[in-house]
Image: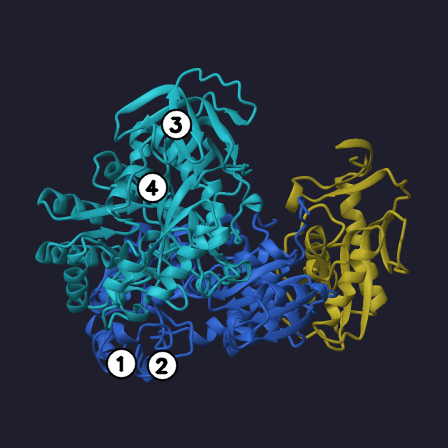
Amino acid sequence: MNIKAKILDQEALQRVVTRMAHEIVEKNKGTDNLIIMGLRTRGEYLATRLKNKIFEIEKVEVPLGILDVTLYRDDFRTRLKQPQVSVSNITFDITEKNIVLVDDVLYTGRTIRSALCAIMDFGRPATIKLCCLVDRGHRQLPIKADIIGKNIPTSINEEVRVKLVEHDGEDAVYLVEADK
Amino acid sequence: MQLKIKHLLGLENVSSSDIQTILDTAVSFKQVLERPIKKVPTLQGKTIVNLFYENSTRTRISFELAEKRLSADSVNFSVSGSSVSKGETFKDTVRNIEAMKVDMIVVRHASAGVPLYLTKITDSVVINAGDGIHEHPTQALLDMYSIREKLGKLEGLKVCIVGDIAHSRVALSNIFGLKAMGADVSVCGPATLIPRNISDLGVKVIHNIDDAIQENDVLNILRIQLERKAKASFPSTREYHKFYGITKERLEKNKKDVLLLHPGPINRGVEISSEMADGEHQIILEQVTNGVAVRMAILYLLGTRHGEEN
Amino acid sequence: MARKTNMQTLLKNLRIIDPELGLDLISDILIDDGVITKIAPEIGLNDWNVDIHDYSGCVAAPGFIDIHVHLREPGREDEETVETGCAGAAAGGFTAVACMPNTDPAIDSAEIVESIISKAAKTPVDVFPVAAATMGRKGESLSPVGELKEAGAVAFSDDGVAIKTASILRKVMEYASMYDLPVIEHCEDESLAGGSMNEGLNSTRFGLTAVPPIAEELTVARDIMMAEYTGAKVHIAHISTAKAVQLVREGKAKGIKVTAEVTPHHFILSDDCLADYDTNFKMNPPLRTAEDVTAMIEGLKDGTIDCIASDHAPHSIEEKEMEFEYAPNGILGLETTLSLSLHHLYHTGVLSLIQVIEKLSVNPRKLLNIPVPAIKEGEKANLTIFNPDTERTVKVSRFKSKSKNSPFNGYVLKGSPVAIFNKGKLITSE
């Protein structure tokens, strides 16, 4: 990994997560019918942290779901490697609920498009909002995040790498040079 | 995790890692089947032909459901009789279908070797849904999935296949697959229904059903198939039931809880009693459900595979 | 290419091997009007009317005969005819063939024997019909043995199947032995027959219906015992299992008049070849195990197996391009037997060149009471000329046979047929 800059360190990342949790509750006007849904892989850990933070703030257990969108991807023919399918974990009814989709980096928007299709096959939510830790720009579809941790403008030959303690052993956000 | 194989013709030369990938992927698809909307868009735009030269409603429907739930376009081509009686050669039939630009062919045929032949004369991905008395890989895979789901593992398990081994493609595929995954495989049945050299495949031969029950964790009970040359090989279904039928009395006598599988359709009162067919030891209907999930996994893994050599 | 018969033909620098005469020398052969007029080294001639060929490096042997050939005429002229079959035989180095009676109708009447012989008269090859042992080969009643012999039949067989019952077999043997004619048996127990390949581990792995080796051995045992009982001559066609060879060995040791032939595919290929379900490896008797192949080689070596015969069985492309279980049995043999025998028996040291010649010429002729051509001044020239060392790549598309069902396409073999000389003509193999 060819690091160009460390955008967020551990303290900064944790403060961002705290602020996002408050924003979620604010935009939902409380915790009624709220569902936090994380996208594998790192979105899952972020969603868990947000759920726990919301519990700290409001003393309410918001339901947590994990979504695997592999079967909804649009890039089977062009990817170099066949992606590995995993399972989603949504054990509750999502109809008429307010879903907050959580992912680490928002880039082209195609993953979120797949996630929207996947969610619709589970039921009919009342609303879906998007919460992402980093928005790096370069959207290819008309997708917009409602809650953003940090805006990081990037060029095409750069990448944003999010590291989380649960998965990578540290909390940080790096700007790196893209692999050729 | 891409499969090494490009087609699924049988389990004889399939690596344990490929089998593992298929079984693991099937877990995701089983989940899809438990949702209200049992559909994913993954194989949208792909055309799959079910080329069934042999009568089979349940396997064909299982494949058809799997294909439709993956949003593929599924077409059935049923032919009764071989190319000999049809006039048109088998090769011409297949070439005609290919000219209609299909992506995958699921084939069942009464003659061994036909799926292999298809891979030589078409560019489509070929999946064997049963070729004569040779292999029936998707059945064995769903059997292994069902066992693993219920008992948590395959390695080291003692599995016995009971019945007409000599004429059973389910038996042969199960032998290859289970052995690849490290299970201890044996077969049980009358000597006239077990091939002379089956032990060369690393399989123990048992003729006494009580021994089979006592020594094994799982019994895969095959249908006694009168339409497949077995007729002259044993005296009657009555005799078979008496000496090989799985009944409540038999299990109680052996004080053993074994897991019972059956590929269906069941001959109640012959290889398995009605009571056992509906009882708590069997997972026959789960096998059917799992069958759709496993077939979805196979269609997904082979249908979205990137061929380096293509 | 044929030349006019009133021309002389001079074949130079041949290694002449005639096992019966004990000859093995390098010499020229001068032939005039089909008769050998001179055998001497360095024959020089001033006569311009001589067709001269330099065959340095080649061997001349008494004309080879393939005693198990299916010419398909009458009945399946789409697959082969007497004419095309003989063209293939000549190209393969044979000056004679014995043709089998499972035609349609079967060779069970004198007229059919005569018709085949007269068609063959126009070809460079001598054809000796084997007549059906029973009417229509049905195994129920005797065919007119005496009449068939007079018309030119040299042996009797229901080939395609074994003679149906012990009682008919006995009658056929008793009758044929009056004329000192052998009964050629396709040994296969009818009730065990019907599978597509040899029964063994491979038939289980490949999921194909199978024929157990004992189906052949039971009939071999029956026929040898009946031959002993009746004093008749029995010839075991296309022997293929180790146990069958052992039975023949024991029969010969007891002085019973039993002989045997083996096909090249049975001393070269095993049932591993069937992994791809290629119908060009499907024949009856089927390819057996590697142990059986070894037993065939041993049998050739110790003389238990007297001769090599191809069981040349042409089939149309549509028929062979079918599901394995439905495809008919049989492969071509005339145009590959000589090369396969030299490559796999002579060049491996199993047999000497003289022994190969005996298996392809002397022994088969003798067991059918057909005169063995002598390479001697004053005798009609009936020669097989081959080069034991040149390599050839088998190209089925260029075969003279009407059919193309051979598994040996592309094989590179050491030892090639070069030409035959028979009926006054030199026919060169291409």
Q: Amino acid at mark 4?
A: Phe
Chain B drawn in what color? Answer: blue
Q: Amino acid at mark 3?
A: Thr
The reply to whether dot 1 and dot 4 touch (C-beta < 8 Å) is no
Q: Which residue is mark 3?
A: C37
Name the residue at 27% across, 78% down.
B247
**Nearest to viewer (mark 2 / mark 1):** 1
Q: Give the spatial CA distance, label 3 vs label 4.
A: 39 Å
**Nearest to viewer (mark 3 / mark 4):** 3
Q: Which residue is mark 4?
A: C267
Q: Give the spatial CA distance, label 2 vs label 4.
A: 47 Å
Instruction: Point out which mark residue B267 bears.
Output: 2
Q: Secondary structure at mark 2?
A: loop
- The chain letter corresponding to cyan is C
**Nearest to viewer (mark 3 / mark 1):** 3
The reply to whether dot 3 and dot 4 touch (C-beta < 8 Å) is no
Q: Amino acid at mark 1?
A: Thr
B140 up-or-down from C84: above or below: below
Q: Give the spatial CA distance, label 3 vs label 2.
A: 82 Å
Residue C255 at x, y percent in the picture = 10, 45
Q: Which residue is mark 1?
A: B237
Residue C274 at x, y percent in the picture = 43, 51
Q: Amino acid at mark 2?
A: Asn
